[in-house]
Amino acid sequence: TVFVLTSTWQAADCRRNCLIVNTFLSAIDKEISYSDLKALLAKGSGLVVDVRSKEEVDRGRIPGSIHIPVENVESDMSLDTSEFQSKFGVVKPSLDSSELVFHCQVGRRGAVATEKARGLGFKNARNYAGGYREWSEKGGK
């Protein structure tokens, strides 16, 4: 959609409404659904990062995920590729990877981790907002 602004009032109104729309679209762009996460895991690609506490992870986890507590996301995602692989046993995703997903229990810490990763340049990082709670409720199926 293209808007032609013919007055200051319209420009101000568009800025406010466009900001709301951009914020909404931005949030959608930063999330992945249960079914899309299942498909990603079925392909055997992507990296799923569990940002919950060790105690939470010990009670159950999404298969194939690695554990980086939310408070360590910036430091661990800043490791060079060889250090990352040595520490986690997986290849560090590229900055433009669309297959980097963070999750927690219900989505809040996952969203924080996603923003931290995006701040480091992982521009397509996404949050599984349903978190481990949704995953376990659906039986991981």
Image: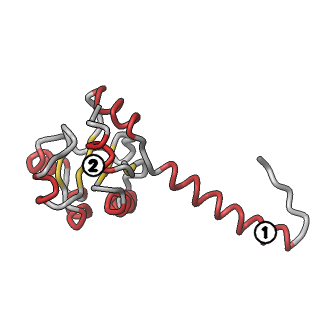
Query: What residue is pinned by disc 2?
Result: 132
* Position above or below: 123 against 34: below
Q: Which of 126 and 80 is in front in this view?
A: 126
Where disc 2 sits, the SS reads: helix
Front-lying residue, 100 or 42: 42
**Which residue sits furthest front?**
137
Q: Which quadrant of the view contains residue 120?
A: bottom left
For the point 50% across and 48% down, which residue is it?
29
Q: Quadrant of the C terminus?
A: top left
- Is the residue 63 above or below the residue 105 in the image? above
Q: Which amino acid does label 2 sit on?
A: Tyr
Which residue position holds label 1? 13
Q: How crowded is mark 1: few (under 14 residues within 10 Å), some or many (20 or more)?
A: few
Residue 39 pos. (x, y %): 36, 29
Which numbered circle lies on residue 39?
A: none
- Specify which label sits upstream in the sequence, 2 or 1: 1
